[in-house]
């Protein structure tokens, strides 16, 4: 019985292991990376990523929902040399990735002579939900309620003083009538008489202040020269 030399034995072992490794590699399908199989909420501006098959010069991207394939993906355009290939959704010519839609895809690799090198398994993913629509205000500026109908500070002041002026001269007669009733029906009551006089006094003072305030803006604008 002849015993195989140790060096020859190691070489044979390396060759056998190499063949086994090659068979395993050849049995593995072309690997898909992105989107991961079963991925959800994938952005509509995302990308496909797969392993670069050795010797491949062209890839075909099949998406089940599209009637046409992306059948002219050149390796030198999509495989930058890091061992992977990238193809962005926005570069698709066969169709668009829509919101909230399921997709299935796979990659097939060919050499320069058009011979099939490898084909990937079929992966699936679903795209993201559409963004919320913007709030539409009619396409113009937002109108705020302006109760004084004023276009400037001075107009606002004038409008406010005019409002107080009208209000004061509407309330003043009521206060005068009330004070008169107190004086007429409470002649022997000094407290009621004093109250009526106080009402009349402060009503007159309030009217005087309102009259002064009504002319004050004109005086200020005249002093400022505006």
Image (cartoon, rainbow, N blue to C red):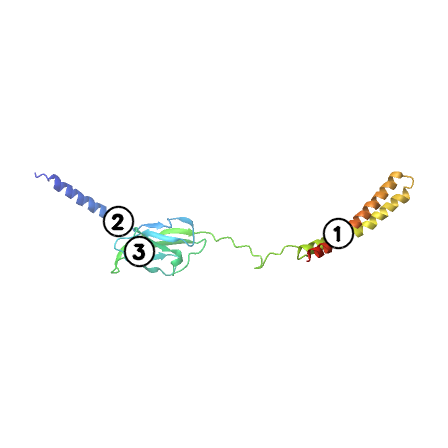
Q: Residue furthest right?
A: 188
Q: Is residue 220 left or right of residue 9?
A: right
Provide the residue designation for mark 3. Answer: 108
Location of the C terminus by quadrant is bottom right
Q: Is residue 198 left or right of residue 112?
A: right
Helix or strand or loop: what does disc 2 sit on?
helix
Give the mark nearest the N terminus, 2 or 1.
Answer: 2
Helix or strand or loop: what does disc 1 sit on?
helix
Provide the residue designation for mark 2. Answer: 27
Helix or strand or loop: what does disc 3 sit on?
strand
Which image quadrant is residue 218 in? bottom right
Give the mark nearest the N terminus, 1 or 3.
Answer: 3
Q: Which residue is located at x 86 percent, y 45 percent?
A: 179
Which image quadrant is residue 194 in? top right
Provide the residue designation for mark 1. Answer: 213
Mark 1 Cα shell of 10 Å, populated few (<14), some (14-19), many (≥20): some
Q: Is residue 37 left or right of residue 175?
A: left
Between residue 10 and residue 63, name the one nearer to us. Answer: 10
Q: Residue furthest left?
A: 1
Which image quadrant is residue 8 in? top left
Residue 117 screen position, x and y as percent? 26, 55
Residue 145 screen position, x and y as percent? 65, 54
């Amino acid at each position: 019985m002849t015993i195989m030399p140790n060096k020859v034995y190691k070489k044979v072992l390396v060759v056998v292991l190499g063949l086994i490794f090659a068979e395993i590699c050849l049995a593995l399908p072309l690997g898909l990376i992105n989107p991961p199989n079963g991925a959800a909420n994938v952005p509509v501006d995302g990308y496909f990523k797969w392993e670069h098959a050795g010797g491949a010069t062209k890839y075909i991207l099949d998406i089940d929902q599209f009637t046409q394939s992306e059948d002219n993906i050149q390796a030198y355009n999509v495989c930058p040399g890091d061992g992977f290939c990238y193809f962005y959704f926005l570069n698709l010519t066969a169709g668009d990735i829509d919101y909230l839609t399921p997709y299935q895809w796979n990659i097939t690799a060919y050499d320069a002579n058009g011979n099939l090198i490898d084909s990937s398994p079929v992966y699936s993913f679903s795209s993201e939900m559409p963004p919320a629509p913007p709030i539409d205000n009619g396409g113009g500026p937002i109108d705020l309620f302006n109760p004084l109908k004023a276009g400037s500070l001075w107009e606002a002041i004038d409008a406010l003083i005019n409002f107080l002026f009208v209000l004061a001269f509407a309330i003043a007669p009521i206060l005068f009538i009330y004070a008169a009733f107190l004086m007429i029906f409470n002649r022997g009551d000094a407290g009621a008489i004093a109250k009526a006089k106080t009402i009349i006094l402060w009503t007159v003072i309030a009217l005087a202040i309102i009259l002064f305030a009504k002319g004050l803006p004109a005086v200020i604008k005249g002093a400022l020269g505006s």
